[in-house]
Image: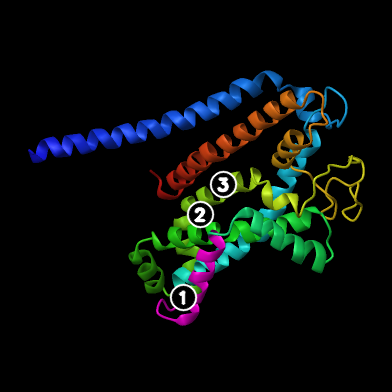
Amino acid sequence: MNPKKVDKLATNVLYVISGIIVVILASLLLYILVRGLPHISWHFLTSPSKAYEVGGGIGIQLFNSIFLLVITMIISFPLSLGAGIYLSEYANQNSWVTNLVRTSIEILSSLPSVVVGLFGFLIFVVQFGYGFSIISGALALTVFNLPLMTRNVEESLKAVHHTQREGGLALGLSRWETVLHVIVPEALPGIVTGVVLSSGRIFGEAAALIYTAGQSAPALDWSNWNPMSVSSPISIFRQAETLAVHIWKVNGEGTVPDGAAVSAGASAVLIIFVLLFNFGARFIGKKIHSKLTAS
């Protein structure tokens, strides 16, 4: 067969495959949004859920998801940044220690979220005695999220051209000062993009949180800002049913009279947040890159 015809045929096949993927994704998103958007209102977003009554909302679950995301990122980002800097700038690439770290990252990244949840339950909930709480969920999600963020930081740092490192050293900067003041700022757009994408992944996680953060959303006292009180919104030692767990629970237990409407609305809210994280990552990354490069 004519090579040009083979090339054209292969290109068309790839276009068709790509189109099928886009159609499947668009169909899923449209189905969830069409079913869920009519049920979303200010009352739905701010009112607490109800187990045996009609008209419940997702206010506490939405707040729990955002608060848990913040705590998880506070814990996981410094660890990922440090590990990424070590692997990219300091590690001996032929050392057995480096190979061990990389192997550990690969294994962690391939673990199912249910396994991470069970690990979190045995270690953080039972052994550490934190019980079902936000801190248990955040630590479990840190284990779940650490490989992805570490790899993202490492790849972002490696993408910086070697002349940047040589320029920093030529100016008399130490190796650490070069990393801190030259390499990391240059890699910042890629790092921020990875952090935002990781946030979307954490926000939609359910399996790992069922066994760690709990499946209930106790009423919160919004006037109580004592971090040690279990009724305080900022307490990390209280149970916290997240939005994704709430969707699973509503569909699984079937005690909510309008469960289908609540599930559809909550699913639409979850999808909207995940889309915002993804589009936000691209927007923020481009803005930071334009500011740093003056382009």
- Give how far across and how far down residue 289 sits, in percent: 44, 47
Q: Which mark is residue 191?
A: 2
Real-space Cα separation, disc 2 to disc 1, in angstroms: 23 Å
Which of 14 and 64 lies nearest the eye of the viewer? Answer: 14
Please tell me which of labels 1 and 3 falls first in the chain. 1
Q: Are marks 2 and 3 in contact (CB under 8 Å)?
A: no
Q: How is the model colour-coded?
A: rainbow
Please tell me which of labels 2 and 3 falls first in the chain. 2
Q: Considering the numbered disc 3 on the image, is that residue within a helix, a strand or a loop?
A: helix
Q: Considering the numbered disc 2 on the image, is that residue within a helix, a strand or a loop?
A: helix
- Give how far across and how far down residue 23 sits, in percent: 43, 28
Overall secondary structure of the magenta section: helix
Q: Considering the numbered disc 1 on the image, is that residue within a helix, a strand or a loop?
A: helix
Q: Is residue 186 left or right of residue 71?
A: left
| Residue 61 drawn in magenta | no
Real-space Cα separation, disc 2 to disc 3, in angstroms: 9 Å
Real-space Cα separation, disc 1 to disc 3, in angstroms: 28 Å
Write the start and end of the magenta stretch as one range: 92-109
Please name the amino acid that badge 2 sits on: Ile
Q: Which mark is residue 74?
A: none
Residue 61: image quadrant is top right
In the picture shown, does residue 245 fall above or below 238?
Answer: above
Residue drawn at point x = 46 percent, y = 75 percent: 99
**Crowd band around label 2 with a 10 angstrom C-alpha radius: few (<14), some (14–19), many (20+):** many
Residue 167 shows in this picture: yes
Please tell me which of labels 2 and 1 falls first in the chain. 1
Q: Residue furthest top?
A: 38
Please name the amino acid that badge 3 sits on: Val
In the picture shown, does residue 178 fall above or below 149?
Answer: below
